[in-house]
């Protein structure tokens, strides 16, 4: 009986250590990237930093998103690696995600504009495919509820905030999702 208990404890310890080693963190950086050459420069070097699993570059929004093993690297070291490539960079962390209904590029423009007009919002990116708004914001100035209300005010259901029927009715036909 003691042997079985000892074996079980050993297995749990091994599994816990294996899970910790594989823990992946995703962080986003705002960088001074301006073109596809900047993207290529980052994609040529950053994936080879220790522990990096995935790198995504969004030139339009000047964002670099990196997924990495947290035991092998840190936000600070990745920030330094991007700086060494010649870019100004700020770590902005992980976005808050809000479910937002919409359909098209017109919706995207309206949703992002309503969000970016709010004081404290740094970056807002809406995905039509995923129906999600990724927002980076200063939580000392604004909260998710305020962001949801601003998006609902322009006709798009956002999180727990529902757009008023009269505002929704005024949307172009291609933007209607109900």
Image (spheres, grey):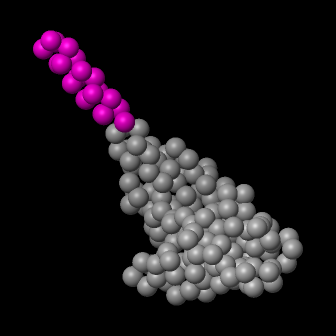
Of helix, strand and loop, which mostly describes the magenta segment?
helix
- Is residue 18 positioned above or below 152 on the image? above
Q: Tell me if 120 is positioned left or right of 109 in this view.
A: left
- Is residue 5 positioned above or below 56 on the image? above
Which residue of the protein is positioned furthest toward the left in this rendering?
A: 2
> Foreground: 88 or 21?
21
Q: Is residue 175 magenta?
A: no
The quarter of the picture where residue 104 lies is: bottom right
> Foreground: 139 or 154?
154
Q: Tell me if 120 is positioned left or right of 36 in this view.
A: left
- At x 80%, y 81%, the residue is 169
Q: Quadrant of the C terminus?
A: bottom right
Q: Give x and y (percent) for residue 39.
A: 65, 59
Q: Give x and y (percent) for residue 61.
A: 64, 70
Q: Give x and y (percent) for residue 11.
A: 28, 23
- At x 43%, y 61%, the residue is 80
Q: Give x and y (percent) for residue 66.
A: 52, 54
Q: Quadrant of the N terminus?
A: top left
* Magenta-drawn segment: 1-19
- Is residue 37 positioned above or below 153 on the image? above
């Amino acid at each position: 009986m003691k042997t079985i208990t000892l074996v079980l404890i050993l297995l749990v310890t091994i599994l816990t250590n294996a899970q910790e080693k594989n823990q992946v963190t995703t962080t986003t950086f705002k960088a001074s990237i301006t073109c596809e050459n900047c993207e290529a420069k980052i994609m040529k070097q950053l994936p080879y930093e220790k522990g990096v699993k995935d790198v995504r570059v969004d030139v339009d929004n000047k964002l670099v998103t990196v997924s990495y093993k947290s035991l092998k690297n840190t936000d600070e070291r990745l920030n330094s690696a991007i700086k060494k490539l010649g870019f100004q960079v700020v770590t902005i962390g992980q976005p808050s995600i809000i479910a937002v209904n919409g359909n098209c590029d017109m919706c995207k423009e309206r949703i992002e504009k309503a969000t970016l007009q709010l004081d404290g919002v740094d970056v807002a990116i809406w995905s039509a495919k995923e129906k999600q708004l990724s927002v980076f914001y200063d939580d000392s100035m604004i909260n998710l509820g305020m962001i949801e209300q601003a998006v609902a005010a322009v006709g798009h259901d956002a999180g727990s905030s529902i757009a008023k029927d009269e505002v929704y009715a005024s949307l172009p036909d291609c933007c209607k999702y109900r």
